Image: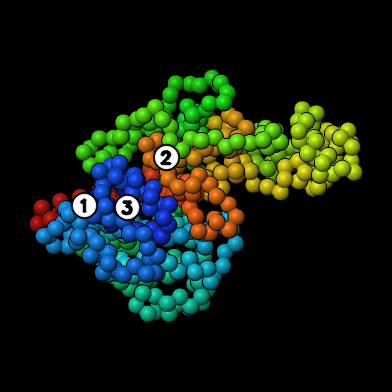
Amino acid sequence: MSEGILQAGFHILYSSDINEDVERTYRNRHEQLGLYQGVNTFFNRSDIRELPSAEIKAAISSLNILKGKAFPKIDAIFGGPPCQGFSRAGQRKKDDPRNVLFKEYLRIINDIRPNYVVMENVEGFNDTKLDGFIGVKGRIYEDNMLVPDILKSEFTEIGYNTLPPKVLDASDFGVPQRRKRVIFIAHLDSVAPPIYPEPTSQLPESKITVQDAIGDLIQGIVIKQQEISSYQLESRYGRTKTLKGETIAPTNKVYNHEFSRHDSIVTERFSLYREGESSTNLTKRILNEGIDLELYPNLLNECHKKIPELSKQEIRNKFLSGNVDIHLIKALLTKKSNRFRLARFSVAPTMVTLPDDYLTPFENRIPTVREMARIQSFDDSFQFLGKRTTGGPRRKVEVPQYSQVGNAVPPLLAKAIAIEIKKAILANEKVQLII
C-alpha cells in the first residue's frame, strides 16, 4: 500500500508493522527513494496493541525535517489490519484475536485525528460477525453484529463520516490480477468528502494480461514473444519516483527472480496442467478424456510405487480409460487440490502467499518472487528481502519474500485510492484560498 501512496504523491512520515522481514524490505525500499529513518520518515516495528499514540507523535516530531516546528496536521492515515481472520479462503473464527486489531487502528485514528482515513481488507471482512465487541470509547456491541456495521458506528463515535464500503477489483486499475479488496474511507466533517476511484481498465480487452506482465521474464524456453508491453517497460523503468522526482534506473540484474528446482516427477506433474486449468478441472478432464501415462514415465513409476498391487500396465490402462478412483488421482497429483496454471492471455487469479498454488503459463514451474511481484504491479527495482520462502510452523512467525508479495495491496490499486484522497485534499486547499 505504501508504494501506491508514494506514487500518488504523498510523503509517508510514519509507518509500522510487526514483522522483522517486512521492516527490512520496507526500509530498504524507502532508502532507495530518499526516505531515511529519523530524517524524513520513521518506521516502528511494533505490535499495534503495544503502540501508544504518544509514541507515534513523538517519533514524527523528532524527524529532522520537523525540528523546531509544531506537530503537523496529518492528511491521511492508511492501514490494513491482518486479513487472515476475515478471509473466506480459510477457517474463520469469531474469537480470532486478529479480528479485533482494527480497534487498535481506530484508537490511533482517534488520537492522531487525520483528515482522512483509508482501511483495506479482504471481501470476507464484509460478512464477518463478532460477539460482544467493545469499542474505542467503551461501547459494548450486541452479539453476532457485522464488522462493517461496527466499524461505521465506531467512526461515528470518534467524529468521522464514512463512505459506504466498496469492493474494488485490482484488475480494473491496471493490475494483471483479479484481486478484490473491500475499502473503507472516513473523513472529518471539516474537510471535503473524497470518492472512490473509477475503474480505468474495466473492459475485458483493456485488462493487463499475465503475458503483458511477465512474458519477458521467461528463460527456460523460447516462445513467440510480442513486442515488450508497456506494462513491462513501466515495471522495468519504474512508476515510483524518488524525492528528487526521478525513477530508479533499471539494471541488468533482475531481483528476486530465482527459479525453484523441481525434480523430474514434479516437472512431469506440472506438465499435466493446461493453461487456465486447476487441479479440480484437471481431474475432471482425466475422468472424461483419460490420459496416457506412457508419456509421463516418472509419474507412471510414482503411481506404481504408491499402489504396487497394480502393475504399470494396469495403471496405464485405467488412466487411458479415465477409470480411476481417488487413490490413483492422489498418487498422480498428490493431495494438493488447489493448484492452478496461469493463462497467458487472461488476468491472474488472486495471488496468495503459497507459490506452489500456481504454475507459469510458459514453463513447468512455479512463479518466481519477481513474477508474482509483477502480477501485483511492483516495480522491478523493488527488492524483497529475507528468506525466499518458508513452511511448517515457521509460517506463523516468518514473512518470507513470497508472503510479502502475496500479502500486499497491489501498488496500482493503492495508488488509485490515494489519488482520490489527494484530490479531496487539494479541494480543501482551494476552498481555503477562496475564503
The tag earlier along the polypeptide, 3 or 1, is 1
Residue type marked 1: Val
Numbered circle sitting on residue 381: none
The tag earlier along the polypeptide, 3 or 2, is 3
Q: Is residue 351 toward the left or the right of residue 311 in the image?
A: left
Counting from the top left corner in percent of width and height, residue 380 is at 40, 35
- Give the number of the mark in front: 3 or 1: 1
Numbered circle sitting on residue 39: 1
- Does dot 2 land on a helix, a strand or a loop? loop
Which residue is depicted at the point 13% across and 62% down?
70
How many other residues sit within 10 Å of disc 2, few (<14), some (14-19) or many (≥20)? many
How many other residues sit within 10 Å of disc 3, few (<14), some (14-19) or many (≥20)? some
Whole-Å distance between the Cαs marked 3 and 1?
Answer: 33 Å
Q: Which residue in the protein does label 3 denote?
A: 195
Q: Quadrant of residue 285?
A: top right
Q: Is residue 166 something that shows in the picture?
A: no
Q: Nearer the viewer, residue 404 or 160?
A: 404
Q: Quadrant of residue 266?
A: top right
Q: Which residue in the protein does label 2 denote?
A: 377
Counting from the top left corner in percent of width and height, residue 259 is at 54, 35
The tag earlier along the polypeptide, 2 or 1, is 1
Q: Is residue 326 above or below residue 215?
A: below
